[in-house]
Amino acid sequence: MNMHGHWQSRPEGGGRFALWLIRTIALHGGRRVGRLCLYPITLYFFLRRGPERRASRQYLRRAFGRPATAWQVLKHIHCFAATILDRIFLLAHGERPFQIETEGLDLLDERIAQGRGVLLLGSHQGSFEALRAIGARRPQMALRVVLDKQKTPAMTELLEALAPDVGACVIDAAQDGTTIALAMAEACADGAVVAMLADRGRGHEVLRRTGLLGAPAPFPVSPWLLAHTLRVPVVLCFGLYLGGNRYRLVFEPFSDRVEIPRHDRGPVLDVLIARYAQRLEHYIHVAPYNWFNFYDFWQEAPAASEPAAEPAAAVGERVGV
């Protein structure tokens, strides 16, 4: 398969045995031993996963403005592997083994205090898992995360085995759209924080293009249609891995309420997506090895023309993470 294939067609890395092995080594040998295992794992994926390697090189060339070296690609893969390993420790031990600094958390708290619920939009950048550690600091904060559990079943099984309560906090994006949209609306009605990733579209989603690192890139419209439907404050979240055991969670208020007109909504969607992409690009430059879209993000075929305005429940059909 070449690097132009859609990300959903790529197989899950490793498999159940490999993930079980690294989990066993990590939990019994500790994080230091687990991190030593990342070097051969990184080299294995660099040598065996050609499409991901080429996609990394393409992305890093755009991020740095010059051709990427093999060492930089290895560093990119290693950064991804490190955050995957840390998911084990974040779920097994919480934030105790880590230094997690926050920025804008008070602004998030202000919106949670309104009691309307909050839609938290992130990206495939750094570690969204660090968000759960912040949730542990605030037991009263209900957190629901929209994830496609079918895309990485082995990893999902491993994480839920470590923390069985995690499964109860997930809204499975593999469900039908009506179920997803209703679950999100119900969670917001209860004052919960609903988190989803907004930089990657699923195969059947409507996409719109906006500039990212100097070229038009496709972004899904469904997060913004859902924000309009839910009528709750929208906050951006970026969980950056800073190396070692350090993370930084950044919260940026985006809108107190997203309004998208039923007619001629394209220009409004373009403005919303462009604002999101600008903040994504900013944090790509802050931490370039943190963005983990290992597929050809820019050169996918443009999406079909956008359909007319649709019922709220139908919006969930295109929820993507």
Image (cartoon, helix red, strand yellow):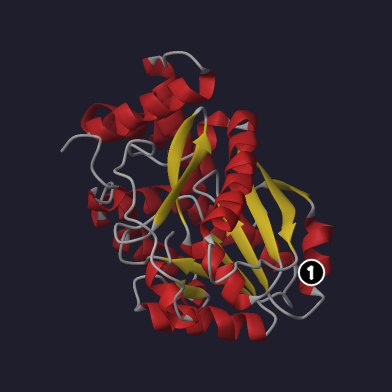
In the foreground, 203 or 104: 203
Residue 3, x across and y down, in percent = 25, 35
Occupied quadrant, residue 116: bottom right
Q: Is 214 left, or right, of 153 in this rendering?
A: right
Residue 143, x across and y down, in percent = 62, 72
> Residue at the location (44% across, 59% down)?
321
> Residue at the location (73% across, 52% down)?
252
Residue 186, x across and y down, in percent = 58, 86
Q: Is 114 left, or right, of 128 in this rendering?
A: right
> Residue at the location (41% across, 33% down)?
77
Occupied quadrant, residue 319: bottom left
How many numbered badges does the structure rendering display? 1
Relative to 163, is 297 above or below? above
Image quadrant for the N terminus?
top left
Q: Is 295 left, or right, of 214 in this rendering?
A: left
Relative to 98, is 77 above or below? above
Report if residue 58 is visible in the image.
Answer: yes
User: Callout 1, which amino acid?
Assistant: Arg
Relative to 290, is 143 above or below? below
Residue 6, x across and y down, in percent = 27, 47
Write down the residue under mark 1.
111
> Residue at the location (49% across, 48% down)?
124
In the foreground, 97 or 211: 211
SS of the residue under disc 1: helix
Residue that extends furthest to the front in the rendered view of this protein = 264
